[in-house]
Image: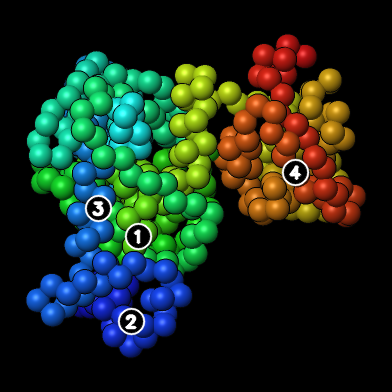
């Protein structure tokens, strides 16, 4: 059965309309001839040196959790076991810095990285953020090739993307597909999610590998997939490059992410909550407590406010609201659109330090 979004479609599109390819700014090298046929081999050749294999030795790893407890549940694309494997992407060659997923290196006693041409290097953990599932490790910088970052905010549904990872023990692997959806949350890969969804196959061991555009620029970090089994790649998910870069910058500056909080709690509106607060809106999260002296109180948020959107993006439930707020750092100003007494109100609140918010 033909895949309408893989290389055959790209070849057909290129044959039918050079104008479309020119408008998409696809480099001519992508279309260089190999036996008379267009090829994506130049992308693989460009990106492959930046993708590494990561091997972890751990005595506290929960293989069942990493593999996904139920059929069809979200699965980190990490080879499970006491000795397990994932992938990583070199983003700073001179400093030997590599980005990967937190779940790849979590609980690691030893981390070893294998770079292109089989060189094996010991690695140390620089820092990690479990909330977004991003981690940074470091190796001795020895002739390493870094990948350029792209602006993931410019991605559109339907854009062609390529994944490159190292499924253990298969070896370096490239797959292709399209961006199927953007800003996915409630997937279950991390607590704070704003994920790219793709139909490009992501396999066990691909976690931390590269999701790239046709220019060979990093648009995402492979994180996991939803599928019925470990042999079915199902629906793949990646952390957008802009979010990954933001987390990396925090890790390099502070050793971790400096998150804040607003000082409020919220819940999905059950029937008793709707009756007790006399709500007219029966869906979306409801603020059920505002701490005295908190950023939420100073901004004007009130108990009973129904949260409709965060930073202009609609929220469906309390889990999605938590995920979106988890992407705001200390000092960031978050825009909340709430419904109060049937009226829509836009409120701006600055994230405050966790210690201060908890002491109130």
Q: Nearer the viewer, mark 4 or mark 1?
A: 1
Quarter of the image where one finds residue 147: top left
The residue that disc 3 covers is 46
Mark sitting earlier along the chain (4/1): 1
Q: Residues within 10 Å of mark 3 (few under 14, many from 20)?
A: some
Q: Which mark is residue 335?
A: 4
* Residue for badge 2: 13
How far apart are the two marked residues, 2 and 3, measured between alpha carbons? 23 Å
Q: Earlier in the sequence, mark 2 or mark 3?
A: 2
The answer to whether residue 205 is above or below residue 108 is below
Q: Are marks 2 and 3 in contact (CB under 8 Å)?
A: no
Q: In the image, which is nearer the foreground, mark 4 or mark 2? A: 2
Mark 1 or mark 3, which has the lower sequence index?
3
- Cβ atoms at labels 3 and 4 below 8 Å apart: no
- Left or right for 301, reference 198: right
* x, y percent for residue 131: 49, 31
SS type, badge 4: strand
Judged by depth in the image, the label closer to the viewer, 3 or 4, is 3
x and y percentages locating residue 238 in the rendered image: 40, 48
- Could you give the CA–CA distance between mark 2 and mark 1, rounded to whole angstroms? 17 Å
Q: Residue at x 22, y 38 (%)?
A: 52
């Amino acid at each position: 059965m033909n895949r309408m979004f893989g290389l055959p479609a790209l070849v057909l599109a290129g044959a039918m309309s050079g104008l479309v390819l020119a408008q998409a700014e696809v480099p001519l090298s992508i279309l260089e001839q190999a036996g008379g046929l267009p090829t994506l081999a130049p992308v693989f050749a460009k990106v492959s040196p930046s993708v590494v294999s990561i091997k972890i030795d751990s005595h506290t790893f929960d293989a069942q959790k990493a593999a996904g407890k139920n059929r069809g549940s979200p699965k980190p694309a990490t080879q499970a076991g006491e000795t397990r494997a994932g992938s990583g992407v070199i983003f700073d060659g001179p400093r030997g810095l590599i980005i990967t997923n937190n779940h790849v290196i979590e609980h690691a006693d030893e981390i070893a990285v294998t770079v292109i041409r089989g060189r094996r290097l010991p690695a140390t953990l620089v820092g990690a953020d479990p909330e977004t599932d991003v981690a940074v490790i470091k190796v001795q910088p020895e002739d390493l090739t870094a990948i350029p970052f792209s602006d993931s905010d410019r991605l559109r549904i339907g854009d062609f993307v390529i994944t490159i990872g190292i499924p253990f023990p298969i070896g370096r692997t490239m797959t292709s597909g399209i961006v199927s959806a953007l800003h996915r949350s409630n997937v279950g890969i991390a607590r704070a999610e704003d994920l790219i969804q793709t139909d490009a196959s992501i396999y066990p061991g691909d976690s931390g590998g590269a999701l790239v555009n046709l220019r060979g620029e990093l648009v995402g970090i492979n994180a996991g997939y939803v599928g019925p089994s470990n042999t079915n790649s199902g629906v793949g998910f990646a952390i957008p490059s802009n979010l990954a870069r933001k987390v990396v910058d925090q890790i390099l500056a502070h050793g971790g992410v400096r998150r804040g909080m607003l000082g409020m709690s919220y819940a999905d509106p059950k029937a008793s909550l709707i009756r007790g607060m006399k709500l007219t809106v029966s869906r979306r999260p409801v603020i059920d407590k505002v701490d005295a002296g908190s950023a939420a109180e100073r901004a004007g948020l009130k108990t009973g406010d129904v949260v409709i959107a965060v930073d202009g993006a609609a929220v469906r439930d309390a889990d999605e609201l938590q995920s979106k707020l988890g992407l705001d750092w200390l000092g960031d100003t978050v825009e909340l659109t709430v419904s109060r007494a049937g009226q829509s109100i836009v409120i701006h609140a600055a994230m405050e330090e966790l210690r201060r918010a908890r002491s109130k």
